[in-house]
Image (cartoon, rainbow, N blue to C red):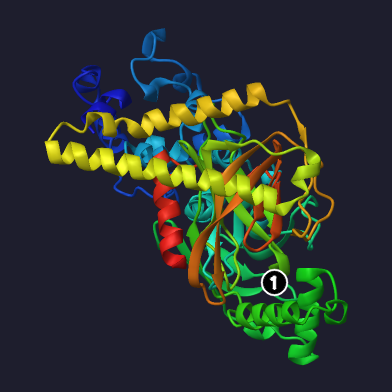
């Protein structure tokens, strides 16, 4: 505070005040009065003083008295207090909004200047991208400082990507600042099996400032318009929503009408159009399970995967085909010589949060010619040979580790094995791509089922991988061998050999904000957490 006092010209650096009149000394003491409130809501608050007229002149752009615009005797200003208020408004407006409450505690002059709405209008625009004409707020009596403090700053922790806790189904929620609203958009895959179509989205809740008192939370679920809701930030990276008027979710035709409406939105068809009995059961089960929550959900933060120059393709979110379960959202991330596909949405067999596929980038596959590729047994033979090779390599690695522990030798070679493995993976990939053509013909083997027959007929490269399969309720889970097929920068596929099935994945081309992981460690911890919750 002593440093701040010297900046204000109150203290030893301004001996002139000691030589001034008693009135000036008293005024200087008042200007240096500290304020202990640190909330942005209070920055710029305080009672009306004799200098309110000067503050109004700042807002209105009217000229200020010459005594405020320059230091005594025309000398250069020795403190911030001697600068013109218009310049202080520009300086304060360039600071982060979270720093302004501390600045308001320095003295009443600073606190008075921080009531200038120009400062908060700039912070709303630069920190949260609010480009609306904030001057319209004056009609409702809401200031830009109110918008910043009671809406944007208060709910800043819920901006970004989230996964709702809806049993095995999960989901993808994106909370964004949209004009003068904060809106939670639930992202839904396109209708099965159109994996290349854009994502669909619908609002689940919104927050806005209706009056100066506090922000209003509204539930957007159902078909009767916005209604009263509540949001509680449970802890770091977790919040919950609650609807206070669930009767707005009901339809006059009862559950049957609600189901048919949900089916058209979720699947783009009617129950009569779905002839597969097992698929009908899965759809009905999902409706019963998800509708019971009535938009009263808990959300946990998820991050987009970090990228590096050695990645096979840009990591990110993809939508993929999963047989009778329809389209699901998968996050592709790279971990040295491994790539992992983690489910963001799931199903009763493999729930959200589980690692659906794992790709071994150190073991590329050379596909046979197009005629032999049609033979499933030939592709299986190639994959099983690589699987056996990987098994032998793991045995040799374990044997070396046991020998070193037995001989009590330093384990430095093993300690560096992970990094060497990453270099080997990148090198193997580069060598394979050097030998192979830029693209090679691709066709699914006879007997392999695909929900989408419109898959690419050329691919770049293939790798050995494993896919997670399980019974209903995630019973007896096991990893089975398969083939990862890279088509281009935005599409890949996976052949499930045991299921004789093919999944096609297409990139979600949405620019998500506030979704980057603060560190690689934070992303890995997030993956571990969502998988443990799913288990």
- In the rendered view, tell whether residue 406 sits above or below residue 13: below
How many numbered marks have been drawn onto this rendered protein structure? 1
Q: Would you call the spot at circle 1 few (<14 residues within 10 Å), some (14-19), or many (20 or more)?
A: some
Residue 283 lies in quadrant: bottom right
User: Of residues 202 and 275, which is closer to you in this image?
Assistant: 275
- Residue 44 appears in the picture as rendered: no
Apparent side of residue 131 relative to residue 417 in the rendered image (left or right): right
Residue 451 lies in quadrant: bottom right
Residue at image location 33% in from the left, 40% down from the top: 396
User: Of residues 297 and 522, which is closer to you in this image?
Assistant: 522
Apparent side of residue 85 relative to residue 193 in the rendered image (left or right): left
> Which quarter of the rendered picture does the C terminus lie within?
bottom left
Outermost residue on the left side: it is 408
- In the rendered view, tell whether residue 468 sits above or below residue 370: below
Q: Position of residue 458 (x, y in %)?
A: 79, 37
Residue on which the image places disc 1 = 226
> Which quarter of the rendered picture does the N terminus lie within?
top left
- In the rendered view, tell whether residue 508 sits above or below residue 110: below
Q: Position of residue 334 (x, y in %)?
A: 51, 40
- In the rendered view, tell whether residue 407 sits above or below residue 192: above
Outermost residue on the right side: it is 273
Apparent side of residue 310 relative to residue 39 in the rendered image (left or right): right
Residue at image location 51% in from the left, 47% down from the top: 387
- Residue 81 appears in the picture as rendered: yes
User: Of residues 435 and 245, which is closer to you in this image?
Assistant: 435
Give the structural element (helix, strand or loop) at label 1: loop
Residue at image location 54% in from the left, 69% down from the top: 470
Q: Position of residue 313 (x, y in %)?
A: 62, 35
Residue at image location 71% in from the left, 76% down from the top: 222
Q: Position of residue 439 (x, y in %)?
A: 75, 30
């Amino acid at each position: 505070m002593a440093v701040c006092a010297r900046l204000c010209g109150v203290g030893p650096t301004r001996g002139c005040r000691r030589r001034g009149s008693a009135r000036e000394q008293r005024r200087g003491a008042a200007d240096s009065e500290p304020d202990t409130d640190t909330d942005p809501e209070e920055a710029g608050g305080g009672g009306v003083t004799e200098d309110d007229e000067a503050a109004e002149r700042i807002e209105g752009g009217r000229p200020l008295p010459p005594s405020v615009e320059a230091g005594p005797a025309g000398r250069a200003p020795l403190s911030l207090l001697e600068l013109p208020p218009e310049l202080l408004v520009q300086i304060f407006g360039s600071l982060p909004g979270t720093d302004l409450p501390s600045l308001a505690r320095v003295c009443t002059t600073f606190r008075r200047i921080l009531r200038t709405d120009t400062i908060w209008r700039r912070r709303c625009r630069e920190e949260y991208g609010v480009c609306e004409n904030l001057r319209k707020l004056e009609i409702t009596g809401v200031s830009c400082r109110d918008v910043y403090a009671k809406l944007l700053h208060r709910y800043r922790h819920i901006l970004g990507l989230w996964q709702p806790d809806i049993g095995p189904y999960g989901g993808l929620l994106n909370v964004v600042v949209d004009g003068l609203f904060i809106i939670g958009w639930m992202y839904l895959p396109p209708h099965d099996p159109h994996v290349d179509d854009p994502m669909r989205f619908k609002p689940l809740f919104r927050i806005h400032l209706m009056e100066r008192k506090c922000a209003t939370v509204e539930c957007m679920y159902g078909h009767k318009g916005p209604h009263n809701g509540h949001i509680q930030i449970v802890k770091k990276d977790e919040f919950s929503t609650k609807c206070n008027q669930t009767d707005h979710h009901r339809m006059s035709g009862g559950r049957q009408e609600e189901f048919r409406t949900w089916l058209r939105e979720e699947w783009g068809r009617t129950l009569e159009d779905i002839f597969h009995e097992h698929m009908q059961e899965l759809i009905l089960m999902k409706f019963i399970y998800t509708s019971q929550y009535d938009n009263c959900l808990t959300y946990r933060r998820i991050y987009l995967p970090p990228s590096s120059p050695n990645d096979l393709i840009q990591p990110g979110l993809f939508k993929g085909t999963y047989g009778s379960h329809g389209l699901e959202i998968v996050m592709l991330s790279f971990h040295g010589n491994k790539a992992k596909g983690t489910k963001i949405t799931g199903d009763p067999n493999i729930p959200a949060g589980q690692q659906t596929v794992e790709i071994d980038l150190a073991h590329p596959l050379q596909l046979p010619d197009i005629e032999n590729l049609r033979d499933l047994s030939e592709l299986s033979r190639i994959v099983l040979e690589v699987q056996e090779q990987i098994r032998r390599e793991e045995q040799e690695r374990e044997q070396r580790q046991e020998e070193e522990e037995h001989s009590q030798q330093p384990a430095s070679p093993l300690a560096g094995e992970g990094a060497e493995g990453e270099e080997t993976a990148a090198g193997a990939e580069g060598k394979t791509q050097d030998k192979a053509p830029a693209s090679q013909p691709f066709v699914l083997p006879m007997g392999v089922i695909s929900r989408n027959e419109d898959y690419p007929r050329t691919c770049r490269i293939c790798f050995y991988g494993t896919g997670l399969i399980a019974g209903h309720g995630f019973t007896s889970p096991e990893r089975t061998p398969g083939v990862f097929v890279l088509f281009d920068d935005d599409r890949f596929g996976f052949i499930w050999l045991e299921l004789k099935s093919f999944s096609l994945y297409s990139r979600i081309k949405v620019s998500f904000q506030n979704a980057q992981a603060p560190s690689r460690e934070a992303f890995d911890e997030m993956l571990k957490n969502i998988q443990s919750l799913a288990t």
